[in-house]
Image (spheres, grey):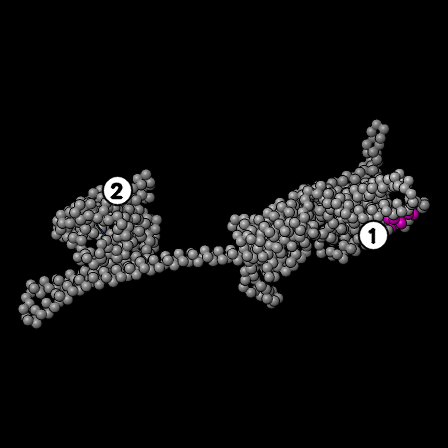
Amino acid sequence: MTDTAIPTTISLIVIGILYLLAVGVIMRRRGLREWDAGLLALYGVISALWTLLLAFSRLGWLAMLGDDASAMALLYGLPFLSLLFFHLSRAFLRLEGPDQIWWGLGVVWIAAVIVLNENLLALPDRMWVGPGWIFQRQSLPFWVLVVGWGLFMGGATIVTARVYRRTQQPLHRNRIKYWSLSLALNVVGAGFFFAGHETLGSGFQFLSILSATYAVVTYRQADVRQIGRRTVSYLVITLLTVAVYTAGFVATQNIFQSVPGYSPVLAGVSMALVLAVLFDPLLRLVQRLVTRLMSGTQYDPARTLREYSANISNILDLERLAKVAVGLVSEAMGSRGGALFVVHYEEGTDKHGENGSGVRGGCFRLQDVTREQNEMFQGVLAAESPVARYLQREHRPLTQYDIDLLPRFQSNSPEERTWLTSLDMDVYVPIYAQGEWIGLLALGRKVSGDRYFEEDLTFLSTLADQTAVALENARLFEDLKNRNDENERLNEELTAANDELARLDQAKSNFIDIASHELRTPLTQIRGYNEILCEMIRDATVDAETGAQMTRGVLKGVRRLEEIVDLMFDVSQIDTETMVLNASYTPVATVVGMAVDSWTGALQERGQTVKVDGLEDLPPLWADGNRLNQVFSHLIQNAIKYTPDGGHIRITGRVLDVEMPPQDRTVEIVVADNGIGIAPDDLGRIFEKFYRAGDVLTHSTGRTKFKGAGPGLGLTIARGIVEAHGGRIWAESSGHDEQMRPGSQFHVVLPVRPQCLKSGGLEAFIAAVRVEDDSVKMTI
Ligand code: ADP
């Protein structure tokens, strides 16, 4: 062994041992559970073995393995390490995707090297003979190795660069910078190996693994930018010091030398004193200048805090407070924006954990008050989630980087993770009032690309403390406002309910008035006839004719009673939506004809005429014929009642929406009279229950007498039936005038084939449609 070989071998052994130490550090700090730490430890062990092998082979200790074996071990060490480094990069950058492909490729590549090295393909020794050069088969494996190594290291470089470009967060970027450094050192080290400088190669390789270990085992790596800034500051200050010192020295030499009593020692001491006094402030000044020049931001904490407190202390509106607070903090920090969340705790039901321990099922609801009520800006954190626990208890800001990387936050639910990532914030600063977590100030990345340094985080905590009182006040004010709004709303509801109650009370009074009035008349009639009949029987003066007349009178009263009770029953069915409609094909002309016929006697009695027009041309309706009959019967009865003797009633019909397919059309039937008409105010109200235009008790009671009042239920029932068929009914009149008799028109619009029949008729309709589909075919 030559003299130079001894120090080389010793350095290789030392480097090998250092590798093992690095592995120890990795295992202690991170263990082998995590994929990147495990791979790195493996990488370290293989590097250590490889370096020691190099050293041992130099010492000749591997001679017994044969020259070939040691050379091969060294030959394959490098490619295997590059393959490992590639995977290590993927694991470090947390790249997902099919890893096996890359492993497979690596294995194929190493196999190719073995095949070529062993010459299993029996290639000739001289592969290419060019003019002046010969390519030997023996050098082929070496070049394949170099190319493969280049491919894997190139791959590692590409993925690192790609992830770096994609990553915006400064802390993540910083972490990747350390990886890039490790990658660069690795490439340089391998370059030295290929060039035959094993010690230098090993040294660089070791530095590479050192940088990788630092990146993997530490979560908070020193900031590369800041190191750069500090280095520049120190360089500048050193140069300045040298310059000042030199200038001072020259000055004392030239100027003070002539001063009597000049002592070089004294001059030197005073110079050193001046420099010592100036050094610190000068260094700080230069550092500040460099920071400002390199990152563009620099805030004065005391001033910012003063301005911040002054600006936010009087704001009571939550949204304005949030906007002002976020605006001021973002401006001071030079961040790209932020948000202020109000935090509400919601009690959950207590559940029992798997091991029987009690788990609080509560959650924190976070609402961003700087933005409109938007789903995206609302988040829910389970009370037991690590992030919520941290923010609730630690009283310290939390960075997104920590959430992404620290093992304690790894158990956070994917939903919470996704929500937090979607906010695109860099740092979260909790706000507390009386020890309770009430708000969260979130800030985006700094425009300068810098991270939030420790002093920034401390300052943000102070700002958050300042925000607490204002936020609590605004929150209370907001609560008060909400409660006020709620009170107002309840008040309005109460007023509406009161109005409704008054209306119902009025309806009830009307009902009692009308019911007593309506029922008393036939009852009096029945009692009167009955008394006369009894008297006549007692006096034995009753003859057959008078007896029959009396019983007819009683019967008439009973019928009227029945009629009124039926009306009330119908109304109650409509009210409770229990009216059953039995739908079938119903020709309108038939229904209206039957309704007219039932009033022939009354019409004759009153000398009134009815003219029916255009009903024959209407398509049949899918409807309950009996109920429709009831509708038109009411309308004709009203027309008779509210038209003086000798009046005219006209019933017309037409098809609406003729452009629609036949089954989607509607028909309109109008019952018009030339009677006393209806006042505009009453047009809508006559359809209400018990409503009768004019004084309820001044009407004379009668079924068809002029202005003979009924119980005020006829139109209510008519509307109920029409609407149950999916139709509409309304009245038109130019006014109420008993002299001029402007007349009234009642419009009934009904669908030819209703989509559904209300009031319990739907089932009947569906059943009927089924029957129709099976046998009867509708022809319109
Ligand atoms: P009533 O049993 O009193 O007739 P309705 O519900 O049928 O009850 O009618 C309510 C009110 O509508 C009637 O009291 C009357 O004032 C008014 N009215 C109804 N039809 C006509 C009409 N054809 N002309 C004028 N007024 C009418």
Q: Is residue 273 visible?
A: yes
Residue beneath disc 1: 18
Q: Which residues are magenta?
A: 5-13
Residue at 5% across, 68% down: 541
Crowding near the residue tagged with mark 1, few <14, some 14–19, many ≥20 C-alpha atoms within 10 Å: some
Label 1 sits on a secondary structure element that is helix
**Residue type at numbered disc 2:** Arg
Q: Calculate the distance from the C-alpha at mark 2 to the C-alpha at mark 1.
A: 103 Å
Which mark is first along the chain, 1 or 2? 1
Q: Is residue 365 visible?
A: no
Query: Could you tell me residue 689's position as x and y percent?
Result: 27, 56
* Residue at 28%, 59% in the rendered image: 507
Question: What secondary structure is marked by label 2?
Answer: strand
Q: Main secondary structure of the magenta part?
A: helix
Is residue 565 one of those drawn in magenta? no
Determine the residue located farthest toward the front in the rendered image.
260
* Picture layout, residue 493 above or below residue 667: below
Residue at 73% over, 48% down: 223
Residue at (84% x, 30% y) in the render: 133
